[in-house]
Amino acid sequence: MGSSILSRLINRRGSVSHEVTLGLIALVLGITVLYVDAFTEIESAIAVLYVIVLLLSAEIMTRTGVTLLAAICGALTLFAFFYSHGLEEDVPAQLRLAVSLAAITITCALILRNETARAGLIEANLHLRDSETRYRYIFEHSRIALWERDYSAVRAFLMSLKAEGVTDLKDYARANPGMIPTCIGLIRTIASNDAALELLGHVADGLPSRTMRRYIAPDDDTFLDLMSAIFRGERHFEGKGNLVAENGETRLVIMSMSFPEDPAAFSRVVVGMMDITQREMMQKAIREAQDELARASRAATVGTLSASLAHELNQPLGAIVVNAQTLLRWLNREPPDLAAVHRSAERIIRDSQRASEIIHNTRSMLTQGDRTPEQVDLETLIEETRTLMEHDFQRDMVSFDVAAVEKPLAVKAIRIELQQVLINLVTNAVQAMRETAIDQRKILISLARKDDIFVTLSVRDFGPGISEEAMAKLFTPFFTTKPSGMGMGLSICRSTLEARGGQLVAGNHPEGGAIFEMIIPIEDDHDRH
Ligand code: ADP
C-alpha cells in the first residue's frame, strides 16, 4: 500500500542514490525555507525559494508528486504567513505572500507542461528506435543484396556539370574518360548486408569496401546509365550489369534503386541487387539443349524419310517383281498369252512410275524443294492406295471398304503428301488388327465435307483402339508400341497436314477400334489468303 503510493509519487528515472541525494537536498531546503519564513524576522518573499524545492523534486517525482508537493509548499507558505503576521493588516507582507504563491503555482504548471512535452518526446524517440530496429532487421536479413550509399557528392558533381551546360552526359563521358572514375570515387558505401557480402565475396576485414571501383566490370555501361538517371533527375533506376566479385568472378546482376525527392536525402540511398548469373546460365543451357534437340529431330526426320522411302518403295517394287514373274509365266506358256503379258507389262510400268514418283517427291521433301499443289480427287487417291496396298491386305487378310463418299470431292493439295499420310494410317490400321479375329479385320474409309473449308477423310479400324496412355503421346516423335516401330509415322503425318493448314485427329470409335481423321483444306493455303 505504502509502496504503491510511493510509486505514484516518485518517478524512477535515475539511480536510487541520485534520487536520495536530490530528495534530501529538497527536504533540507524546504525545512530551511519554512524555518526562515515562519520563525525569523526577515522581511522578504522567502517562500519563493520553495520554487527551488519544486524544481529539484521535479527530477525525481511524478506529476501527482509534484502537484502534491506544490500544494504542501503553498500550505506551508500560508502557515508561515499566519504564524508570523496573524490576521493583522500588513500590505507588504500580503504582497510577498501573493508573489510566493504565484511563483509556486507557475513553477508547478511549468514543470507539469515540461513533463508532458518530455513524455511525448520519449515516446516519439521510442517509435523512432523501433522503426530503425525494424529497418535494420529487414536490411540485414534480406536475401536481396542491399547497400546503403551516399550519393550526395556525386549528385552535386553531376548537377554542377549540368549547370556548366552539359546536356548529354553520355556524350560528355565519352569525351572525358576521367568522369566515370571521378563519379565512382565520390560514392561512399555506408553499410551493406550479408547478402551483399555474399554476392561480391567477403572482404578480409568483414567490412564492405569503401569504394565500388574494384567491383565495376571495365566494359560495363550500367554505371553510366545510373549516372545519367541521376543527371536527368529520375526517381528510379533499374539496370542489368556485370560486377566483379572479390574472387575475380564476374556476376551478372539486376540492380534497382529509388532516389529521394529531397537532394539532402541522397546521402542515404538504398541499392538492391540480385544475382542472376545462375539463371542466365540455365537459360543459356536450355536454349542450347533446345537447339540440340531441334538438330537431333531434323536428323531423325531425314532418317525417317529414308526409312519411309524404303518402306514405300517396297510396295511398288514387290508388285513389279510379282508382275514380272506373272509376265514370265504368261510368256512361257505355249502359246504365250500376249494379252496377259501386255497387262502385266502395263502394271509393271505403272508401279515403276509410282516408284520413281516416290523417289522424286521424297528427294524434294528432303531438299525442301517447293511443290505445286494440284487438284486431287480424293476418291481416286483412295482407290490408288487400295491398289498400292493390295499385297498388305491380302497378306493380313484385311478388307478395305470405302463408305459414304460425297461426290465429287476434290481438294487442292500435293497429291503425294496426302497419299503418304493415308498409306501410313492404313498401314497402322493393318498392323493394329494383327490380333483381331480374321473375320473382323476391316478398314473403313469415309470421306465427307466437314464445312466450307475442310474435307474429312477418316480411316477406321477394328483393332484394340488406342490406350489412354498412348493417346497422350501418339504424335510425339519416337513414340511406338511396336517391337520394330520407329514411332515417327504419326508425328510426320500430323506435321505434313498442319504445314498445309490441315489437321490430324486421333480417337477411338465407340464401337471399338481406332479412328484417324485427316482434315484437309479444300483450297490451298495460298488461294485462301
Ligand atoms: P510406329 O508405327 O512406328 O509405331 P507411328 O507414329 O505410326 O509409329 O505410331 C505410333 C504408335 O501409335 C504406334 O506404335 C501405336 O501404339 C499407336 N497407333 C498408331 N495407329 C494405331 C491404330 N490404328 N490403333 C492402335 N494404335 C495405333
Image (spheres, helix red, strand yellow):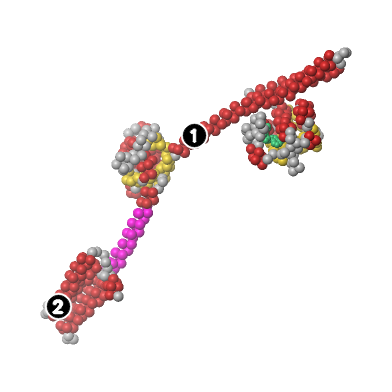
The question of residue 128 being in magenta is answered with yes
**Of 497 and 54, which appears nearest the observer?**
497
Quarter of the image for residue 396 reads top right
In the rendered view of the protein, which quadrant contains the C terminus?
A: top right
Q: Residues within 10 Å of mark 2 (few under 14, many from 20)?
A: few
Q: Which residue lies furthest to the left in this view?
A: 41
The residue located at (79%, 36%) in the rendering is: 440
Badge 2 or badge 1: first in the primary sequence? 2
The residue located at (18%, 73%) in the rendering is: 27
Q: Report x, y in % for residue 379.
A: 79, 31
What is the secondary structure assignment of the residue under circle 2?
Answer: helix
Q: What residue type is labelled 1?
A: Lys
Q: Which mark is residue 108?
A: none
Q: Which amino acid does label 2 sit on?
A: Tyr
Q: Which mark is residue 284?
A: 1
14 left or right of 499 in image: left
**Magenta span: chief secondary structure:** helix
Label 2 near ligand 1 (CB < 8 Å): no
Q: Residue 35 carries which label?
A: 2
